[in-house]
Image: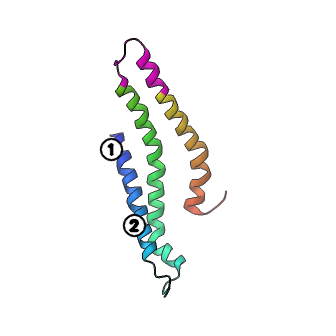
Amino acid sequence: CCSSLVVCLMLISMLNATFILVAILRYDTVKREVPFSRFWTTRCEDDWRFALRAFALGVPLFMVVLAQIGWVSFWRKMDGPEWIYASSCISVISVFTVVIYLTHIERKWKDWLLFGNTS
């Protein structure tokens, strides 16, 4: 369930970003019947915010899936406790990455990118 949710979120994010890029490339820079700021506000901004939210939710979920893959892949495949150590290492790295992402990267950039404020 979690892995399919990751794929869906990342696909939504990628498709929206691609369509926004196409819309920007089709914007007529010569005639400029509509100013770009108005074009962005009416055609692109809501989809861009939706894509960013999908991506921001997909990153931690991807790390959860990565942590699960370690346990599924190594489940009793080795003699002794080595499979537990290998799976635990993958899980610890995944949790560490999610903590860094949530406490630094997303916290620093998400509000500024979505709402334009610097607080």
| Above or below for 21 versus 29 | above
Place of residue 93 in the rendered image (x, y in percent of width and height, measured from the top left): 52, 32
x 60%, y 49%: residue: 107
| Mark 1 vs mark 2, CA separation in Å | 22 Å
Residue 4 circle label: 1
For residue 105, side relative to residue 15 (left or right) = right
Q: SS at mark 1? A: helix
Q: Amino acid at mark 2?
A: Phe
Asked which colour scheme the image uses, the reply is rainbow
x 45%, y 38%: residue: 63
Q: Residues within 10 Å of mark 1 (few under 14, many from 20)?
A: few
Of the residues under marks 1 and 2, which one precedes in the sequence? Answer: 1
x 49%, y 26%: residue: 89
Q: Amino acid at mark 1?
A: Ser
Place of residue 58 in the rendered image (x, y in percent of width and height, measured from the top left): 44, 47
Extreme-top residue of the structure: 80
Residue 77 circle label: none
> Which residue was labeled with disc 2?
19
Q: Is residue 16 magenta?
A: no
Place of residue 43 in the rendered image (x, y in percent of width and height, measured from the top left): 44, 73
| Above or below for 61 versus 10 | above
